[in-house]
């Protein structure tokens, strides 16, 4: 067994990877990663800070995990010199990163980074019901920001109500259909009629008529609207979500065990089987979690948003950037016990690590600890911010000429009458997005030509 472990570790060490990510603070009072006050900018009428948030890269060369560094870098000398601001545009750009929080998820699509931050005002009622259609809320709100994923330029910022249910364990682009999926935490949404109209559902008089729990959803990033594939069926503490190159979706739970790590640093159950954080696979068509016989990864982690992505060359290899432990460890007296929060800077409670997980077995290996407790909210392999997706679909452009007009309706009608495949782009012609071509698509296309709205 030891020989097999050594061989596996050597295999990991022989392979290098450069990972990129969106910074997420694990603690905002970490003295090793601090904000720097530059000065008051009188032209912009605001204080300017250089903050930890931003776009990062982190290299594992097969031997050493190098310190995460900002990319693009933020250099004070580029906009401030001799006590004066020399470039207000760059000063504003640098200061904008203080809004790049993504404690509720982030995703990159079409070169745009979308970050979602949930904020709960301290009024003791963070779960308050929110009326549909309300724009703001005194309790839980979502701050949605969009950025240029290469330059870090801020594109837009808006506040969404709690009713939108934008908190997620993560989001990812599916390379098979180009859609964005996520594992979203559903709260306070009414259950669908198919459930509400089922008399057996209300056999228990205490049954709530609103949805709750995690659900696989798609999300329209233009409207920031989720579409549930299932109700909120799942209640595990999910901490990640990622989709591999085969279009298979996976999440990690935080695990639940008070056991001490073995000599190899991993956690085993009473039957000597790996336990801890567990890899879960979801069917993106049904939204249901698939049964499996995977082991645990062998590592415990905390119930906080983390990041995962897949190797560029191996769809079975997941990289996971998570916490070093579940908040338990050895105290000053050698007892295995929950670690005190106030001593987190010395007891390792919020330390982070980079892991490699085999999704076929569920087994994980800790590659290395990450210095200074860095944690990413979104992570991807260098050069693979977005997976390869099918050719861009121009909805309604049935004749594939790059424009949408009455000629497309004619082409679609001709196709329905003659089935002349060569004359139509079937993906573009699916105007009602139901994966089938019928007269409904013609009606939808004509409506669009009259209203310019789908």
Image (tube, helix red, strand yellow):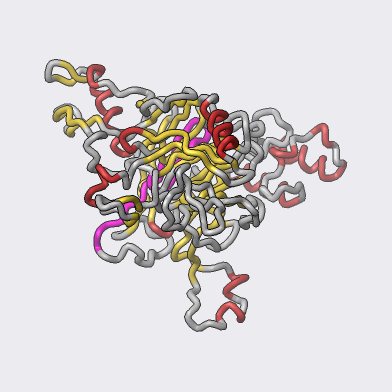
Q: Is residue 36 above or below residue 122?
A: above
Please indicate, yes or no, whether residue 98 appears anywhere in the rendered image: yes
Residue 60 percent location from the top left of the image: 46, 26
Residue 85 percent location from the top left of the image: 18, 21
The residue depicted at 56 percent of the width and 47 percent of the height is 181
Q: Decide which of 413, 236 is in the foreground and name it.
A: 236
Instruction: Give the magenta-colored segment's residue range.
Output: 103-123
The residue depicted at 34 percent of the width and 55 percent of the height is 336
Q: Which residue appears farthest toward the right when viewing the image?
A: 418
Image quarter hosting the N terminus: top right
Please indicate, yes or no, whether residue 219 appears anywhere in the rendered image: no
The residue depicted at 43 percent of the width and 49 percent of the height is 261
The residue depicted at 50 percent of the width and 77 percent of the height is 207
- 100 sits to left or right of 269: left
Q: Decide which of 434, 396 is in the foreground and name it.
A: 434
Q: Which residue appears farthest toward the front when viewing the image?
A: 2
Main SS, magenta residues: strand
């Amino acid at each position: 067994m030891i020989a097999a472990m050594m061989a596996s570790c050597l295999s990991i060490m022989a392979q290098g990877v450069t990972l990129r990510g969106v910074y997420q603070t694990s603690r905002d009072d970490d003295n090793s990663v601090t904000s720097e006050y530059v000065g008051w900018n009188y032209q912009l009428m605001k204080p300017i800070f250089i903050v930890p948030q931003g776009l990062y890269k982190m290299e594992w060369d097969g031997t050493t995990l190098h310190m995460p560094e900002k990319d693009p870098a933020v250099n004070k000398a580029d906009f401030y010199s001799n006590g004066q601001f020399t470039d207000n545009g760059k000063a504003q750009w640098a200061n904008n990163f203080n809004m790049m929080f993504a404690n509720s998820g982030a995703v990159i699509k079409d070169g745009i980074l979308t970050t979602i931050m949930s904020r709960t005002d301290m009024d003791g009622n963070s779960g308050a019901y929110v009326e549909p259609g309300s724009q703001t809320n005194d309790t839980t709100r979502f701050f949605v920001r969009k950025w240029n994923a290469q330059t870090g330029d801020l594109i837009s910022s808006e506040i969404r109500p709690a009713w939108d249910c934008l908190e997620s364990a993560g989001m990812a682009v599916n390379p098979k259909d180009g859609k964005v999926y996520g594992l979203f935490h559903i709260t306070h949404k009414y259950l669908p009629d198919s459930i509400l109209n089922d008399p057996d559902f209300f056999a228990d008089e205490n049954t709530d008529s609103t949805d709750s729990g995690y659900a696989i959803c798609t999300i329209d990033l233009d409207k920031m609207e989720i579409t549930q594939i299932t109700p909120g069926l799942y209640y595990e503490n999910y901490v990640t979500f990622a989709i591999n190159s085969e279009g298979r979706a996976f999440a990690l739970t935080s695990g639940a065990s008070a056991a001490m790590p073995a000599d190899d640093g991993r956690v085993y159950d009473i039957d000597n089987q790996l336990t801890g954080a567990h890899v879960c696979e979801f069917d993106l068509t049904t939204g249901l979690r698939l049964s499996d016989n995977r082991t645990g990864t062998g590592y415990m982690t905390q119930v906080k948003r983390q990041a995962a992505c897949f190797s560029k060359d191996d769809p079975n290899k997941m990289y996971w950037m998570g916490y070093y432990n579940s908040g338990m460890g050895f105290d000053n007296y050698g007892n295995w016990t929950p670690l005190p929060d106030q001593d987190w800077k010395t007891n390792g409670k919020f330390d982070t690590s980079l892991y490699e997980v085999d999704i076929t077995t569920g087994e994980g290996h800790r590659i290395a600890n990450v210095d200074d407790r860095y944690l990413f909210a979104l992570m991807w392999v260098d050069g693979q911010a977005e997976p390869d997706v099918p050719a861009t679909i121009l909805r309604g452009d049935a004749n594939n000429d790059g424009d949408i007009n009455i000629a497309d309706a004619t082409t679609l009608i001709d196709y329905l009458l003659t089935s002349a495949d060569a004359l139509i782009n079937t993906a573009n012609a699916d105007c009602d997005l139901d994966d089938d071509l019928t007269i409904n698509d013609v009606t939808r296309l004509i409506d669009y030509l009259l209203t310019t709205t789908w």
